[in-house]
């Protein structure tokens, strides 16, 4: 197994770091960091407005990142790609700009119990404000969504918002099949997909998936923080209200009336995160150079090893959320370890230089549903190695020794 | 620095003031839903002096040892003095340094004690 560790400069200053929190944010390859520095050092001008060389250079780089994103998720045109701050903002944008327009009293807004708060609360609030019904689809105890959606989607269902990969369970949901059913049950339903955790697990093709919207963050796919993406079908973007009002998003302003730009600019008010957008393009270049298939295969193999090691060492004393087989694991391990408090486990792991997350991971409804107040979450990415997993297991043994 | 020192672990495993008081002057429960920590503090106060204190609850080692160590310190003290306690007092009692993310665990018991005293004065 060849690790991609050498591409990530954080290991130069932190050679002993065991970073197991890629679900929160991935590490950044050198090319992405260089890309940020390159913009700020060599052509740090604003986009669109300048009639001079470096502004044009910045505009070209910014728009070329949009094309890279469009190509990466197989959008039909780059105008369907909107740059936001993060997944949360992308999802809120849909709830605000389209949700407020199409949802009214008596309608239904549907989410699943798997959702991250960012794909739960905007819809819950929208339903509350409009008087619509907020329906939450439950899963079985392994976090699997139902196969049959005929009792869920009705003629009143205006929006279904679903996560592609839960940040706690870590397994891709069969969204293609589910969306097909939703379309058959109600062709008018708008389907919103939170793909924040899915970008590195399998190749995404929005046309094949047939979702209306897809939201994700740059920083969970080797890109910088501060930039997120919203893909939307062009017709729906045209139909939506603008999101934020101000500079860049207008065509003309007079005392009597303002005319807005077409998508995507209608949704990108103010100076955007230029350097970050450009560096997201560089992150996509990096992913393409490794390939999503190879990333996914590497993480799956390492996950299988991690699952087996955990079960071999701790048996029933560790309960891992999600499907119970080495083969089905895809990089995310949210778990309960004896009855130890997740913060204590994470705190002791930290003294071994191991970075994990503890808490409910912004998925309180899911934790309640599965009956865990909180969990520890370890997640794997292409810079992790078997040695990292071994260090993790060793440190967990010390946790057991210390707290028992 | 290892925050899970023997003294902290020991107070977690063998607390001196864990339990419920049947008779108390004031009691209050505070929680931190983000961490799942929840602490109830019982105080017996006489002439402005804390005579007895106990706590119950669930939480991480830092929050529970902090509760035990704090109660140990405030028993016998005037409430006015205890009200002036801040994060530095708690950290010096614990003898550890905490990052910003764990500080709230250590300070939850002090919050409970302060709220209990304030409730008393109203």
Image: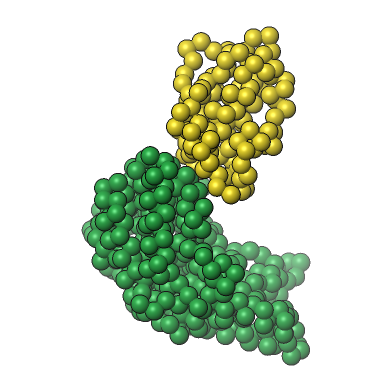
Asked whether, in this view, residue A126 is left or right of residue A42, the answer is: left
Residue at left 42%, top 65%?
A388
Q: Nearer the viewer, residue B81 or A41?
A: B81
**Residue sitting farthest toward the bottom:** A53
Question: Which chain is represented by green in the image?
Answer: A
Q: Quadrant of residue B112?
A: top right
Q: In this rendering, is residue B120 above or below A252? A: above
Residue at left 51%, top 22%?
B17
Q: Nearer the viewer, residue B11 or A186?
A: B11
Q: Nearer the viewer, residue B85 or A42?
A: B85
Asked whether, in this view, residue A200 is left or right of residue A149, the answer is: right
Q: In this rendering, is residue A361 above or below B53? A: below
Q: Quadrant of the N terminus of chain A?
A: bottom left
Q: Quadrant of the C terminus of chain A?
A: top left
Q: Quadrant of residue A38?
A: bottom right
Question: Which chain is represented by yellow in the image?
Answer: B
């Amino acid at each position: 197994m060849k690790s991609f560790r050498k591409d990530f400069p954080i290991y130069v200053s932190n050679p002993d770091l065991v970073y197991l929190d890629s679900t929160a944010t991935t590490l950044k390859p050198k090319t992405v960091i260089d890309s940020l520095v390159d913009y700020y050092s060599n052509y740090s001008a604003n986009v669109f407005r300048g009639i001079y060389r470096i502004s044009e250079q910045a505009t070209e780089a910014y728009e070329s990142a949009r094309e890279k994103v469009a190509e990466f998720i197989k959008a039909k045109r780059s105008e369907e790609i909107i740059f936001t701050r993060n997944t949360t903002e992308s999802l809120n944008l849909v709830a605000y700009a389209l949700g407020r327009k199409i949802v009214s009293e008596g309608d239904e807004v549907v989410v699943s119990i798997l959702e991250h708060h960012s794909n739960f609360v905007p819809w819950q609030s929208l339903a509350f404000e409009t008087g619509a019904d907020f329906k939450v689809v439950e899963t079985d105890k392994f976090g699997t969504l139902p196969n049959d959606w005929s009792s869920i989607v009705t003629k009143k269902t205006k929006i279904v918002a679903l996560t592609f990969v839960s940040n706690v369970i870590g397994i891709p949901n069969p969204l293609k099949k589910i969306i097909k059913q939703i379309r058959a049950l109600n062709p008018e339903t708008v389907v919103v997909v939170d793909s924040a955790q899915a970008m590195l697990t399998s190749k995404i093709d929005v046309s094949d998936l047939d979702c209306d919207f897809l939201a994700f963050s740059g920083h969970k796919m080797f890109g910088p923080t501060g930039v997120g993406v919203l893909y939307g079908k062009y017709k729906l973007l045209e139909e939506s209200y603008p999101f934020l009002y101000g500079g860049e998003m207008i065509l003309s302003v007079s005392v009597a009336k303002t005319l807005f730009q077409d998508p995507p600019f209608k949704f990108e008010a103010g100076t955007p995160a230029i350097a970050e957008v450009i560096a997201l393009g560089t992150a996509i270049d990096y992913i393409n150079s490794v390939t999503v298939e190879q990333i996914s295969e590497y993480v799956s193999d390492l996950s299988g090893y991690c699952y087996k090691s955990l079960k071999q060492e701790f048996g029933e004393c560790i309960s891992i959320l999600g499907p119970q087989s080495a083969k089905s694991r895809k990089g995310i391990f949210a778990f309960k370890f004896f009855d130890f408090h997740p913060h204590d486990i994470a705190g002791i792991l930290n003294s071994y230089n191991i970075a994990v997350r503890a808490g409910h991971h912004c998925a309180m409804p899911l934790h309640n549903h599965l009956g865990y107040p909180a969990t520890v979450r370890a997640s794997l990415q292409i810079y992790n190695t078997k040695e990292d997993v071994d260090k993790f297991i060793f440190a967990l043994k010390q946790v057991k020794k210390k707290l028992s | 620095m290892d925050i899970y020192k023997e003294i902290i672990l020991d107070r977690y495993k063998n607390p001196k003031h864990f339990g419920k008081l049947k008779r108390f002057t004031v009691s209050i429960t505070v929680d931190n839903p983000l961490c799942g920590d929840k602490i109830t503090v019982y105080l017996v106060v006489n002439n402005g002096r804390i005579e007895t204190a106990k706590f119950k609850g669930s939480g991480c080692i830092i929050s529970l040892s902090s509760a035990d160590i704090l109660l140990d310190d405030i028993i016998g003290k005037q409430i006015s003095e205890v009200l002036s306690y801040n994060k530095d007092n708690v950290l010096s009692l614990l003898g550890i340094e905490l990052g910003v993310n764990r500080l709230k665990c250590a300070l939850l018991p002090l919050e409970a004690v302060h709220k209990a005293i304030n409730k008393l004065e109203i």
